[in-house]
Image (tube, rainbow, N blue to C red):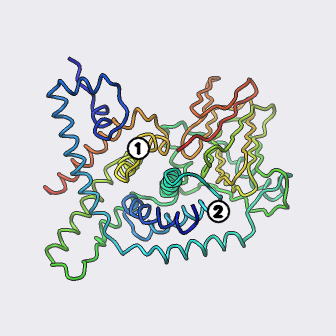
């Protein structure tokens, strides 16, 4: 795959994943771009699925190493940075803002590894790919994911009730 | 009757591989069928909640592409931070200073791991090996490690890349990798952002504990005289082990 094809195939999905992982659109763009820089700088080659997995894993490690995710989430929650969509009613805008804050807070209750497992699964990765990315046995992913989903959902629900 | 555990139910929900027995059980167990339906409902709810995080400015692929091209150009034009094969005196001195402050080791569950992983903690000494070197057949870092444990973390490893770990006499840890690799050394830890090429790690036979990680996954741990190997082993003998980086 050439630069343009690879970029167009994987960049939007990677940015969305990084937005979920960091809760910060600017940091997400930075991490996604750095992942692509490393991909091309190191001359990594492979199938489309293989390159996608490499990019997401690299981005996960960059976030883990570079950004203090919890700190960012708390700051973002405090700043409540959701911008209203043009033409959207104030009520709908408020509702979206609350949904976003609740999801960020719920992710914040998860351990780093559980958060990565949850977000990779909901980005469409297989258990095997997730296992190799986070460094656990593939047979453990179901159990870890069940725990992460339950905790996330519970936190979302308690956030709604609050 | 033994019901399916939650992990198996999720694996079935997500179309993963489980024993045929699990599917047979599901066909005749109302309780597990109900649990599967609940798991599906939870997946829908989680997906809905996560979509709330997708809000943000539109993703401008063309602008991002241009930014990445710029970064690549800058990186290719800039001199690579390298430590030459003869281990330049500046880099070597810096590394020895870093190690002199005490080799530190953290077991996988130790809170020290976060510290070693790069959290900003006051007092942490980190040395970037920025000494420019002449082209050399091998490049890497060499550290004097009289005692204690070590963690070697290799990142951005490519599928099929070869990693050789050898036990050696003396007190020198050596990590050598491809010419485009970048090294970061802090107390008790060597991090290598790998470029293409084989990796060779010479570990002093007397030091423990030792951890070698590839892309965040532990492939080897030596502790209390025992060896735990989790990577994809290409070959093994008493003097060391050769791994190959597995498919992601």
Residue B161: where, in percent of width, then height? 66, 44
Residue B170 lies, with reference to residue B135, above or below; the image says above
Residue B83: where, in percent of width, then height? 78, 56
Residue B43: where, in percent of width, then height? 25, 47
Q: Quadrant of the N terminus of chain B?
A: top left
Foreground label between 1 and 2: 1
What's the residue at 26%, 45% (across, down)? A151
Q: Residue furthest top?
A: B1
- Answer with the quarter of the image where residue A92 lies: bottom left
User: Considering depth in this image, is A131 or A109 the residue closer to the camera?
Assistant: A131
The chain holding disc 2 is: A
- Answer with the quarter of the image where residue B3 lies: top left
User: Considering depth in this image, is A31 or B99 the residue closer to the camera?
Assistant: A31
Q: Secondary structure at mark 1?
A: loop
Residue B176: where, in percent of width, then height? 76, 47
> In the displayed structure, does residue A40 sit left or right of residue A54?
right
Residue B235 lies, with reference to residue B138, above or below; the image says above
The residue tagged 2 is A41
The residue tagged 1 is A126
> In the displayed structure, does residue B62 sit left or right of residue B158?
left
Which dot marks residue B155?
Answer: none
What's the residue at 74%, 23% (across, down)? B238
């Amino acid at each position: 795959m050439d630069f343009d094809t690879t970029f167009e195939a994987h960049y939007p999905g990677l940015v969305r994943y990084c937005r979920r992982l960091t809760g910060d659109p600017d940091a997400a763009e930075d991490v996604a771009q750095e992942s692509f820089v490393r991909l091309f700088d190191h001359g990594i080659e492979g199938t489309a699925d293989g390159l996608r997995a490499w990019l997401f894993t690299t981005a996960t490690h960059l976030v883990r190493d570079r950004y203090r995710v919890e700190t960012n989430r708390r700051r973002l929650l405090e700043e409540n940075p959701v911008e209203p969509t043009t033409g959207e009613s104030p009520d709908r805008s408020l509702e979206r803002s609350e949904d976003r804050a609740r999801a960020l807070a719920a992710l914040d209750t998860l351990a780093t590894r559980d958060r990565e497992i949850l977000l990779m699964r909901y980005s469409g990765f297989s258990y095997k790919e997730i296992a190799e990315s986070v460094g656990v046995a593939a047979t453990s992913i179901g159990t870890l994911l069940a725990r992460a989903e339950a905790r996330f959902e519970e936190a979302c629900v308690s956030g709604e009730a609050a | 009757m033994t019901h399916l555990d939650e992990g198996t139910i999720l694996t079935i929900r997500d179309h993963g591989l489980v024993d045929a027995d699990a599917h047979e059980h599901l066909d005749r167990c109302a309780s597990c069928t109900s649990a599967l339906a609940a798991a599906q409902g939870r997946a829908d709810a989680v997906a809905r909640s996560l979509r709330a995080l997708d809000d943000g400015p539109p993703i401008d692929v063309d602008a991002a592409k241009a930014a990445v091209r710029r970064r690549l150009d800058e990186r290719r034009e800039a001199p690579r931070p390298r430590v030459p094969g003869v281990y330049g005196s500046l880099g070597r001195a810096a590394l020895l200073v870093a190690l002199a402050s005490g080799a530190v080791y953290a077991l996988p569950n130790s809170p020290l791991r976060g510290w070693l992983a790069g959290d900003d903690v006051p007092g942490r000494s980190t040395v970037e090996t920025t000494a420019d070197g002449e082209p050399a057949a091998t490049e890497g870092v060499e550290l004097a490690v009289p005692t204690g444990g070590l963690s070697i973390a290799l990142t951005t490893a490519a599928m099929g890349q070869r990693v050789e770990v050898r036990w050696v006499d003396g007190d020198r840890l050596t990590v050598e990798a491809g010419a485009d690799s970048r090294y970061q050394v802090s107390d008790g830890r060597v991090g290598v952002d790998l470029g293409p090429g084989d990796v060779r790690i010479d570990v002093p036979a007397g030091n423990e504990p030792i951890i070698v990680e590839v892309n965040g996954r532990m492939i080897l741990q030596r502790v209390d005289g025992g060896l735990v190997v989790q990577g994809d082993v290409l070959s093994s003998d008493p003097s060391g082990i050769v791994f190959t980086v597995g498919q992601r």
